[in-house]
Amino acid sequence: MKNKTIRIALTKGRLENKTVDLLDKIGYDVSELRDKGRRLILNIPGEDIEVVLAKAADVITYVEHGVCDIGVVGKDTIMEHGGKFFEISDLGFGRCKFALAGKKGNNFYEGYGIKTIATKYPEVTRAFFENKGMDIDIVKIEGSVELAPLVGLADAIVDIVETGTTLKENGLEVWEDVAPISARLIVNTVSMKLKQQRIAEIVKQIEENL
Amino acid sequence: MKRYDLLTPEGTRDQLFDECIAKRTIQEKLRKIFTAYGYSEVITPGLEFYEVFNGKVHYFPSETMYKLVDGKNRLMVLRPDNTMPIARLAATRLRAEKLPLKLYCNQSIFMVNPKNSGRDDEFTQVDIEILGGESKAADYEALSLAAQSLFAVDEDFRLEIGESGIFRTVVDDLNLPEEKAELIHTLIENKNYPALNEALEGISCSAAEAVKALPSLFGESEVFEAAEKYMYSKELRTKLNTLRETYDALCSMGYSGKIKVDLGLAHKKDYYTGILFRGYVEGYGLPVLSGGRYDTLLGDFGRNSTAVGFAVNVEAAAKVLLKSVHEPLTKPVDVLVFSMSGCETLGLAHCAELIGEGLTVFNSLSATEEEAAEYAKQHGIRRMDVVGANSAVTVKEV
């Protein structure tokens, strides 16, 4: 990487398309990004910008270690993984929420038994219930979390809810919102200082085109 | 069963050859600067009582410290920081020493990093601490030494200054409950503008405006003008002016263009009370140097004194140094000395002689001259001396 090249890490998938649209709107040549094949590092012709595609949690890791200067990643991943970086902008897209959900009609807070929560996001879940001062058991699930309360593994789930259709179709309902989610722009703490001007320009362009 | 006898714990590693040279080079450069300025070295124990770091204020979260118990079941920690042991030292064995005291230390510190983060759990830190003395003079000296230390690591460094008093005053003036104030600190530290605006929604006062502006007030001299309108009290204006004077002083010392300022430089929990500073070099994603003024910490240990200091992360600096050199740091020795069978003591005597001439030697332990020559070739040693009976030396080019 040339000394002053700005490397941007994008979260692959849903956020990627929206971010590429945004870069397009700013006026960057995103042809390589749209037709990327299997390449992982892509150029924006005529600009000092390099784009890296990575899984959400890896975007944070790359930015934290300073090998990427800027990252676009969902608040859900930031909440689950944490880390040291500047979280400077809410990009507004990829909007959804973390919610506590369970079987329709049940009262989660009833009784004194310790509740079991199934989730893909154990840290988010732990922090949420720690703030409530409530002891719970967390079961980490990798796939469809909605299954856990249905088969009796958990009393509730903490998961990302967009439209709520999956919940409804499985007889579940949202009991409580945990936190809102949207895509965020993050910046490495050292890059922010060493490449201040260029990063400020890019951030401004991005914010103006939201 | 897993063979743990063959592994080093996560976050620790064996350092070999060039890595050692790079690390020693940095340590030596820093030591030279500090001893030239009359700093005295101290070494504190690697093991300390838990209470040293978890006393009046909990600056170090319990889960980030390596803990163990001593023979009396008392809780100990592997030192997570060099400043607090020095504060303890100043209040105990150095209590009769007149201030100001200028100390430096060069030792490992230990911290538990999140799993799989790729960060070092054990790393060497070189610290200087100035205890007592006139604050302005001490700040300038510490900053000057910080700039010199960074220069020793990478000539193209950036030294950034901030003032913890500014955001503390502003956040205090908001009169928020402790939890909320802590959240605001974190948000300023992370330059999380959207969340900061959200957290302050509905609060409209000059302090809230200032808090919202603080994280974006970073850069060079233009920051001071931009910040003026947010400094709503005389106290804040004075603090900003002092910082500006410091900034100008550093520029006048020949560091113009390398000095940056960030009014949002903040830590949720730290012992700093005045000026804060951080050093950055290209090629490492975190600051390689950090420090500041801590006027209340020594008081926590029972000796009221002002103090200022900073620490350089030696491992980080060594990594940057290693990246910047393109040839191995390890140089081959000048001469390989091979002794014929029965002439081993003569060979060693010849080694000593060569060393006396200022050369470096490798006393060959090979069985035959051919093997020795092969070793020399493999290791880039250009000259081989063969020592025979009666100290007869044949010099050969390899």
Image (cartoon, coloured by chain):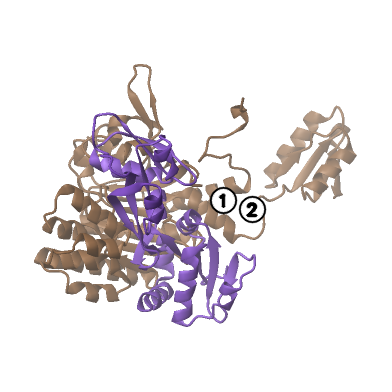
The circle on residue B167 is: none
| Amino acid on which disc 2 is placed | Leu
Horizontal placement of A111 versus B2: left or right? left
Chain of the residue where label 1 is placed in the rendered structure: B
Classed neighbour count for the residue bearing mark 2: other residues with Cα under 10 Å, few (<14), some (14–19), many (≥20): some
Image coordinates of residue B21 in percent, x first then y, are 59, 48
**Camera-side residue: A62 or B96?**
A62
Q: Is residue B110 visible?
A: no
Horizontal placement of B267 versus B118: left or right? left
Work out whether A89 lies above or below B113.
Answer: below
| Amino acid on which disc 1 is placed | Ala
The residue pinned by badge 1 equals: B22
Instruction: Locate the C terminus of chain A and report the quarter of the image it occupies.
Output: bottom left
Q: Is residue B192 visible?
A: yes
Classed neighbour count for the residue bearing mark 1: other residues with Cα under 10 Å, few (<14), some (14–19), many (≥20): many
Residue drawn at point x = 40 percent, y = 51 percent = A169
Residue B148 occupies quadrant = bottom left
Image coordinates of residue B247 in percent, x first then y, are 29, 68
Image colour for chain A is purple
Image coordinates of residue B310 in percent, x first then y, are 35, 51
Residues at circles 2 and 1 in contact by the CB criterion of under 8 Å? yes
The residue pinned by badge 2 equals: B329
Horizontal placement of A188 versus B393: left or right? left
